[in-house]
Image: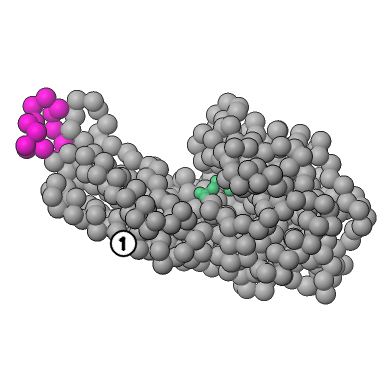
Amino acid sequence: MRLSVDGARLTRELSQLATISAEPPPVVTRVVFSEADMHARRYLWQLCEDAGLELRHDPVGNTFARWRGTQPELPPVATGSHIDAIPNAGSYDGTVGVVGGLEAIRTLARAGYQPRRSIELILFTAEEPTRFGIGCLGSRLIAGSLPASVDETLLDADGQTLRQARSQAGFTGTLADVALKPGHFSAFVELHIEQGPLLEQHGNEIGIVTAIAAPATLRIALTGEGGHAGAVLMPQRRDAFLAAAEVGLAVERSALSTESVDTVATTGLCQVFPGAVNSVPSSVKMEIDVRDIDGERRDAVLKSIQTATSEICARRKIHAKIDLLNADPPAQSSPAIVELLATGCVAYGLRGEKMISRAYHDSLFMSRITPTAMIFVPSRAGVSHRPDEYTSAESISNGVLLLAATLEQLAASA
Ligand code: HGY
Ligand code: MN
Ligand code: MN
């Protein structure tokens, strides 16, 4: 079956989605359950309904848009990604997998294909950690990787619980009902931008993801003693920011110490309190992101950061509270689906290469309950999580074409 993607409509819809943001274009900010997020969800729900898909929303706001197959009793094939975006982000992270997933379904339908297994497009809630401090919230809960108690224990910056936030957004019901059992789906394939430079550097059109790096997040609260910036003399100070500054350098030192290019660590959040130029910082809240394709090596870096923090704080008479928010194992893709993607590249004349994903994705958790793989399309200059993030319409269409061809195979299987 020769498939052809409606690239013009795909571009139109992605451009329209990019305008639904808490910030004016080209900046995209869409934090989970915010007005922008809900507006974007409604826009996508409408596109799915226009395509004749049946919608279901679970208690945390994951949406499942189903194309019923001829044998709907068989475990469905799934695809999908996220539309939430961190502050000051771009237009393509996640959205390419949701709008592109919908276009893959429409491409198959336009070609007269009728799936045996139903095909479900999943719009995952809160892939980004922005509001509740933990990434992949929706897919973690689907995979049963989080206890339902997070409904009360996950708090946003205003102290609102996950339960309050999701209920206000209209998503009610028992959080435990989000979990789906292994075998619920027969396969999951996610289309996503690479968020790195390799495909562009290598002149390739498709990345076939064989593994996803293991992410971990530390939250460190440092408490010293505040005071008047003019009156408190240097020897008497217990300046929380200076301890944080040393911790930040220890984070970098710990990552570099493994001497592996696969180890990365970032202090992405550092809030100084009270945040006045003439007041000695009394407390600092830091959040640190540590990743590696090797889980043990990643854990050794976490340990090194915690040891360094204790030494720095003992010397500076600062109190440190260290919380490990998540430390997830790496994920391996399904070799069978990887092979299917490689075959699809040959069949459609797409230049592809196998690679690992250094960013995490909902696939990291879907791989815990179903055979999973990812399709990457190139990011210009490898830029992502910035307003100048860009992937060409042609590249996105290539990814959608391969996704459609792969779904065609997977949903035809008995
Ligand atoms: O941070 C990540 O890897 C993903 O983009 N949320
Ligand atoms: Mn992201
Ligand atoms: Mn993403």
Q: Is residue 211 at least partly visible in the picture?
A: yes
Residue 400 seen in this snapshot? no
Magenta segment: 225-237
Amino acid of disc 1: Lys
Residue drawn at the location 82% of the way across and 64% of the way down: 409
Quadrant location of the C terminus?
bottom right
Element at badge 1?
helix
Looking at this view, is 8 or 213 the one in front?
Answer: 213
Query: Which corner quadrant holds the N terminus?
Result: bottom right
The local crowd at label 1, few if under 14, some if 14 to 19, many if 20 or more residues have their Cα within 10 Å, is few
Q: Looking at the rendering, which quadrant does residue 190 occupy?
A: bottom right
Looking at the picture, tell me which residue is in the foreground, 194 or 145. Answer: 194
Residue 86, x across and y down, in percent: 51, 41
Is residue 233 on the magenta stretch?
yes
- Count the labels in the image: 1
Q: Is residue 190 left or right of residue 326?
A: right
Which residue is disc 1 drawn over?
Answer: 303
Please report the residue visible at 55 percent of the width from the left and 65 percent of the height from the top: 331
Q: Determine if the magenta segment contains residue 73.
A: no
- Residue 130's x, y, as percent? 47, 45
State the predominant SS element of the stretch in magenta.
Answer: loop
- Label 1 CB, ligand 1: below 8 Å? no
- In the image, what residue occupies the spot 72% across and 53% down? 352
Judged left or right of residue 376, residue 8 is right
Residue 65 placed where, x, y %? 73, 55
Q: Residue at x 60, y 27 (%)?
A: 25
